[in-house]
Amino acid sequence: MASLIQIVRYLDTYLRICEIEDWPNALNGLQIENSGRVTKIGAAVDASTHVLTEATKRDVDLLVVHHGLFWPGLQPATGALYRQLKLALKNDIALYSAHLPLDIHPKVGNNAELATAIGLKSTAPFFKEKGELIGLKTRASLPREELIRKLRKVLAGPVKTFDFGPKKTHTIGIITGGAGSEVYRVAGEKIDTFITGEAPHWAAVAAEELGINLLLGGHYATETFGVKALGAHLSKRFDVSFAFIHCPTGI
């Protein structure tokens, strides 16, 4: 039986938790410990009452998430937070969160996994944030409509497209999640086709002004890849069963 401390030590090193700066409320690493044993690993994009309830039903005792419990910042343990903590503690569920460290990981990261899923090769890191290159780019001559079809297939859902760039791509950039507000900086790095999850209203106007393709696959959908890959990796390494807990937000 794998122990929680073994897995946490491995994750901290594998994801470079202590090296990568992040937004403070991400609180990367172990957020809640349990009694110390791990018999089943669960993975989800977000920590929530719904996800913790599903984890309980599936006998998960280590839940790995991309967005942890403390995104709203310092708050009293009342209401939703109390409910979430009670679920975890009562059912002996440890919670581990990895935000930016999971986005940028070269093997199990959201960007790397999405790029692989749509068949992009020879990717290179780009777009510096918090001292790290948080996106991936590649030179690829690909019909725009073919790229959109591939995205829709791997995301198993709609892709909102703003087709203001070339019909055949030259340089594709990927930053999963909510990076649409960075469209100006991305275009400044000679990206003509930008894949991300979501964007503010004005980003669509900016895409037209900049003459780039902006492809929005959904914040949630583009960030399922990392936790799935990380959960599968841990399952194999520590010989522990694994389940993905699907709880889409619609965004």
Image: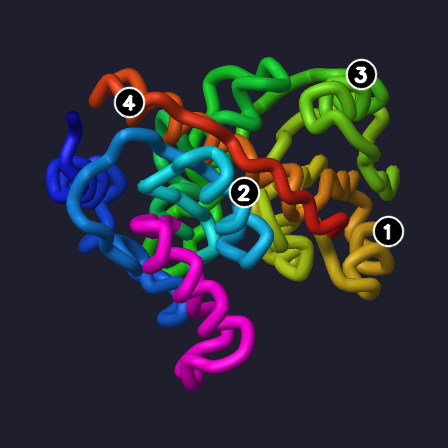
Above or below — where is 10 with respect to 142? below
| Residue found 56% across the figure and 40% down from its top | 223
Q: How is the image coloured?
A: rainbow
Mark sitting earlier along the chain (2/3): 2
Q: Which mark is residue 208?
A: 1
Question: Amino acid type of disc 1?
Answer: Glu
Per the model, the C-alpha gap separating discs 4 and 2 is 18 Å
Is 75 contained in the magenta span? yes
Q: Nearer the viewer, mark 1 or mark 2?
A: 2
Image coordinates of residue 29 in percent, x first then y, are 27, 54
Image coordinates of residue 46 in percent, x first then y, are 53, 51
Q: Which residue carries the number 3 mark?
A: 146
Image coordinates of residue 244 in percent, x first then y, are 51, 31
Question: Amino acid type of disc 2?
Answer: Glu
- Magenta highlight range: 69-98
Q: Residues within 10 Å of mark 2 (few under 14, many from 20)?
A: some
| Residue found 40% across the figure and 65% down from its top | 85
Per the model, the C-alpha gap separating discs 3 and 4 is 38 Å
Q: Residues within 10 Å of mark 1 (few under 14, many from 20)?
A: some
Q: Is residue 96 visible?
A: no
Q: Nearer the viewer, mark 4 or mark 1?
A: 4
Mark sitting earlier along the chain (3/4): 3
Q: Nearer the viewer, mark 3 or mark 1?
A: 3
Per the model, the C-alpha gap separating discs 3 and 1 is 21 Å
Question: Amino acid type of disc 3?
Answer: Glu
Q: Which residue carries the number 4 mark?
A: 240
Side of 111 where 161 appears, left or right: right
Mark sitting earlier along the chain (3/1): 3
Question: Amino acid type of disc 4?
Answer: Val
Judged from the image, the secondary structure of the residue bearing numbered disc 4 is loop
Q: Residues within 10 Å of mark 3 (few under 14, many from 20)?
A: few
Q: Which residue carries the number 2 mark?
A: 54
